Image (spheres, rainbow, N blue to C red):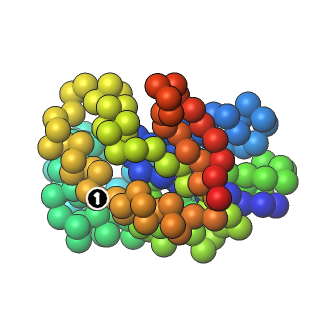
Amino acid sequence: MLKIALTGGIGAGKSYVASLFEIMSVPVFYADDEAKKLYDRGDVKALVKRHFGEAVYQNDVLDKTKLTQAVFSNPDNLTLINNIIHPRLMEDFDCWAVAQRSPVVILESAIIFEANLARFFDLVLTVHAPLEKRLHRLKNRNPDWTNADINQRVASQLDQECKVKMADLVVWNGEEGGREIVYLMR
């Protein structure tokens, strides 16, 4: 089985490219969606409460706003939450991948390189788009986010150019000649 990591900066169009693979019947594991489910597990709740305080859970439900503020305000907190979530997420991915019975599976995640997950994959595919295009997409997709919110999230990820250099293959998802265009590079 070929395991592909699909990555790129926030707003680059990873989900769009993932949907193209799904159209071709390639199973896609959406890491962000699956990671959110982990916060309901007892072992994860206990660790998150221990490190971030009881207040991050209200009535036993994660208060995403409080956790997000804690995580993105301090790089050490981002590392801490990643150390809680990523090992469990990769275990879930491996179980999911085997169950797919497909010759190719994809894990979609913005932080493959930041979380040192590339080593678990046969191929890393990075979706690349110009920063202006990414910011425009983020503003449209998240109208309640301030410019500071957007900049904080962009800054928490590895520079897009670094991701492109580290990738095995690159998908350009931007604009040329005034038209939206997607194509494979490298």
| Residue extending furthest toward the front | 177
7 vs 129, nearest the viewer: 129
Can the viewer see residue 131 in this picture? yes
Dividing the picture into quadrants, the one containing residue 82 is bottom left
Query: Residue 137's image quarter?
Result: top left
Tell me which residue sits at (48%, 72%) in the image: 116
Horizontal side of 167 relative to 154 (left or right) equals right
- Quarter of the image for residue 150 reads top left
Position of 151 compared to 107: left or right?
Answer: left
Horizontally, residue 130 falls left or right of residue 24, namely left
Q: Looking at the picture, how far across and down is residue 107, in whole percent?
A: 61, 53
Above or below for 73 versus 12: below
Q: Residue at x 55, y 55 (%)?
A: 126
Residue carrying label 1: 156
Tell me if I can see residue 94 in this picture. Answer: no
Of the 4 image quadrants, the one containing the C terminus is bottom right
Residue under the point 28% across and 58% down: 156
Is 182 displayed left or right of 98 in the figure?
left
Q: Position of residue 49 (x, y in %)?
A: 25, 59
Amino acid type, mark 1: Ser
Task: Name the secondary structure under disc 1.
Answer: loop
- Image quadrant in which the N terminus is located: bottom right
The residue closer to the viewer here, 91 or 76, is 76
**Rendered view: 12 above or below 177:** below
Q: Position of residue 24 (x, y in %)?
A: 78, 35
Q: Nearer the viewer, residue 162 or 3?
A: 162
